[in-house]
Image (cartoon, helix red, strand yellow):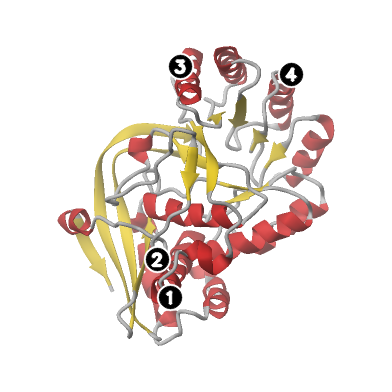
Amino acid sequence: MKITDITLTLFTWSNLPKISYGAHAAGGGETKMGLLAIETDEGVTGHAFLGSATNGADSEAASLIRTLKPMMLSEDPFARERLNQKLWSRIRQTTTRAVGAIDIALWDIAGKALGVPVWKLIGKVRDAIPAYASSAVLPSASAYAEEAQRIKQAGWAAYKIHPPQRLRDDIAACEAVRRAVGDDYRVMLDSTWGYDFPTALRVGRAIEEMGFYWYEDPLHDQDVYNYVKLRQTLHIPIMATEYPMTGLESYPVWLMNHATDYLRGDVTVKGGLTTCLKTAHLAQAFRMNYEIHHGGNSLNNLANLHLAMCIPNTEFFEVLLPEEAQKYGMLEEIEIDANGLVRAPDKPGLGAAIDFDLIRHNAIAVLR
């Protein structure tokens, strides 16, 4: 089998609600998505999405076609490891999201060609995983509390707060959520790189007293020095490494300096399933969890789900809210069952039911 062509169809996603997850990411109104198609001489096509509600595909599409496509043509799509090394060799001319999209589509090809789900290629360890809800920035402490109550009543495993990144307001939101859901329900705080060290310490001490399950990304994404101090001072588990947007080589400094309790990443921002699998196994060697971040769009989140089925050292599947700002371009979306679980896909490849009619109707360009 050989790769014969790669195209990226840009299409619009309109009527998005106004959303924010912190100073790093906000959106609303309209964005541009990309459908990546890798075609082969045996009629098998692999797909991935590029873009999200807060990061349009148009910002990365040109480098994928200009820089990465020529490297892939006439190659064997089953040679994923060799191709992955080639893709990463050009990272200064492209992005990790573009690398990730191609890697995901290659896994999709392999599963379709062999007639099995991607998880079967890797090796499944579970049939289902508990889901947790991850908030947007909300207008008040009471709004967080109300949302957390709804999530608990729906049977989901946990609720995570993205706060407004203001010391007193953040603590107030955490207090309101804890009161609303009780002492036994799992809640987390993801401050999305919003604090300096003194603020991170004050907030961390507060949520430690409230029994929060983990404390995620309070400091700048590369502030290893202060993460070490924070972890030495607090007893609540610290979660970092979701960013920076680099590959496997970004993790050793965190491990060697004992700067985090968990490793973190997803198929979009870390360059695909291939990188995430390696990182999950690296974390496992240190008896650490590798918690999977939301994939940014419907199809890549499906790739995340295959990953979650295959690694023993991840606990939850993240569902970013509001869901109407995360689900687009698919006829069938990932659903949470009555027990708060997400189940393994059972169709070949990623098992994606892509809404090709919607994409054609909203297409604005096909990049070749």
Residue matched to label 1: 114
Alpha carbon distance from label 1 to label 2 = 8 Å
Please identify, in this view, whether the residue under mark 2 or under mark 3 is nearer the observer: 2
**Label 1: how many residues lie within 10 Å, few (<14), some (14-19) or many (20+)?**
few
Alpha carbon distance from label 2 to label 4 = 46 Å
The three-letter code of the residue at mark 1 reads Leu
- How many dots with numbers? 4
**Which of the labelled discs sits on residue 146, or is there none?**
3
User: Mark 3 and 1 residues: CB-CB less than 8 Å, in contact?
Assistant: no
Alpha carbon distance from label 3 to label 1 = 46 Å
The three-letter code of the residue at mark 3 reads Glu
Alpha carbon distance from label 4 to label 1 = 51 Å
The three-letter code of the residue at mark 4 reads Glu
Q: Could you tell which of marks 2 and 3 lies nearer the N-terminus?
A: 3
Q: Could you tell which of marks 1 and 2 lies nearer the N-terminus?
A: 1
Name the spot of residue 18 as percent of width and height, x first. 34, 32
Alpha carbon distance from label 2 to label 3 = 39 Å
Secondary structure at numbered mark 4? helix
Residue at (31, 61) in percent of width and height? 35
Residue at (67, 44) in percent of width and height? 240
Residue matched to label 2: 348
Classify the position of the C terminus by image quarter.
Answer: bottom left
Residue matched to label 4: 209
Q: Could you tell which of marks 3 and 1 lies nearer the N-terminus?
A: 1
